[in-house]
Amino acid sequence: LTAVGESSMDPTISAADSTAQQDSLFSMMDVFLISLITGLFTYWFFFRKKKEEVPELPKMQTCVVTSARDSSFIEKMKKTGRNIVVFYGSQTGTAEEFANRLSKDAHRYGLRGMAADPEEYDLSDLSRLSEIDKSLAVFCMATYGEGDPTDNAQDFYDWLQEADADLSGLRFAVFGLGNKTYEHFNAMGKYVDKRLEELGAQRIFELGLGDDDGNLEEDFITWREQFWPAVCEHFGVEATGEESSIRQYELVVHTDVNMNKVYTGEMGRLKSYENQKPPFDAKNPFLAKVAENRKLNEGGERHLMHLELDISNSKIRYESGDHVAVYPANDSSLVNQIGEILGTDLDTVMSLNNLDEESNKKHPFPCPTSYRTALTYYLDITNPPRTNVLYELAQYASDPGEQERLRKMASSAAEGKALYLSWVVEARRNILAILQDMPSLRPPIDHLCELLPRLQARYYSIASSSKVYPNAIHICAVTVEYETKTGRLNKGVATNWLKNKVPDQNGSSSLVPMYVRKSQFRLPFKPSTPVIMIGPGTGIAPFMGFIQERAWLKQQGKEVGETVLYYGCRHEHEDYLYREELARFQKEGVLTQLNVAFSRDQAEKVYVQHLLKKNKENVWKLINEGMAHIYVCGDARNMARDVQNTFYEIVSEFGNMSQPQAVDYVKKLMTKGRYSLDVWS
């Protein structure tokens, strides 16, 4: 263009030259325009997808960037007229359920409650709670793993440890959810209760300790029925009437809905299973293909299986000892039977919308969705329902006898508790069984969906090493199947769902929604440190990963310490898991000792602890001189306790210690990270 400007100023240009220049001018303009159009087209073609995705960004940002006002539960309580806040530390949903029940109770005493996830709020605001009249903070805190806080209470726990806040105006109460078979029973509940008092807060009712090994529901009801009178006495209020059924959500049926806007089983973002984006976690699981699914045992009634999940292109990283969480689906025949018994079209698309517009929880599960999807992917229909569900359902029983029976089981009377324990808990009656055994009980399906707890992810110890299998996660599991006292066949949700996963098949039949949860169950930092691994049955899972990793380290030329395994099963020729693999590792010298207890191959039962006792001198030498790390995986109720008692005996005998000194010695090993547990009950 500059050339054009310059030449037009020259008076000596002839007509021919002028025409030639015009031609060149047009050709240059053509080139420019064509280039411009091509450039714009190219930009549109290659970048339009990114453009289309832009509208999603503000949504994501709003989740992350919350204003100070939004993260203040005090502001929210003032705005909505609440005076009781019930925080929950929940891993499987039970503590959240209890918190919702307590916050709902409050209205009976002329008070207003709200349940709150500590992860969503700034807990340093606890010092300001006294600004609200008749205010109280309740904490329903579950303990996870080996005395750890649940994921959503981790920040709160960290804050409590570091805080030097003055909480002298705060009134509080704590109910802990734990399991007595675990070493650190109710550690989180006990810690919160103690720490709040240390910071100056006033406890208005004693710490409640729920035991899931016993009857957690009964523990909660017993605590709750004494808790509220203490609240009444403290604030000078009294109950305004009977426990009433108040709906938390309203039903909206969608007759004309765009099916692209309907949830079909996703945990968080709509269409997240069709359009997968890392990072993957509990709210955004990865759909892993099942690459292998084989039966491990050669005989017996049980089905023990080895699965391999393909995590290629997921950017998922894991370490030996981590857990894999999978989201299962309920058996379609159970779902169909519930639909039939309640006379419902399960494919009706609906939403349950929270009547409390200020609540952070807009729906009990992703909505809009169909009843079929909700009962298949979102709701727990196989566990015995808790008493609050029975109480709320009672109003729908047309037979007065059945209605009274349901109300009695939900009451705090001794007779009612005993009936609930025998008829529901011990008989393992799920919601379908209750509907079948109470012919007059026909609740509206939407209210039932509101009341049932969420279906939870199931955790499995990873049975592989990422050093050897960077693109796969191995699972070792046993299918759960048993007959109840009512003669029904109950099946474990996740294990039976996994059993039916077919490798290399297109469609959902080979896909597993999953994510990885980090654990503290780790190999020693130095490969030369000896390890003693004790894992009978499927408790061998993490040790397959450990042994694979030690073999890999050896191949890398590292000095690898003694690797000792104590494994147990029922019969040598029936359920000896990974027999060939273990024999190969032993032959290669990676597995320096392979001790296997076959519990039922002889008259007297032999378990892993018996083999530990048999080799007690070697065990003590590894611990005392070799500074070995001890790992125990499997059943918490009996095995882990028996193994621990055996270590007390060995330490006492060879360390010349009294029983209390030996116990203290083993507890110190735990504190130092030299005695680790990965157990379940």
Image (spheres, rainbow, N blue to C red):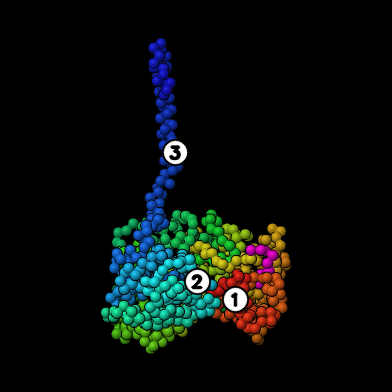
Question: In the rendered image, is residue 355 in sight?
Answer: no
The furthest residue to the left: 240
Mark 3: few/some/many CA within 10 Å (<14, 14-19, 20+): few
Residue range (magenta)? 525-532
Disc 1 marks a residue whose amino acid type is Lys
* Residue 281 image position (x, y, % from top left): 48, 61
Residue at 64 percent of width and 63 percent of height: 525
What residue sits right under mark 1 in the picture? Answer: 667
Residue that label 3 marks: 42
Is the residue 442 above or below the residue 317 in the image?
Answer: below
- Residue that label 2 marks: 144
In this rendering, which labeled residue sits more in front, label 2 or label 1? Answer: 1
Viewer-closest of 476 and 298: 476
From the viewer's perspective, is residue 314 above or below residue 139? above
Query: In the structure shown, which secondary structural element does the residue marked by tag 2 occupy?
Result: strand
At a point 61% along the width and 80% down the height, the residue shown is 663
Look at 68% across and 69% down and name the residue there: 530
Quarter of the rendering occupied by the N terminus: top left
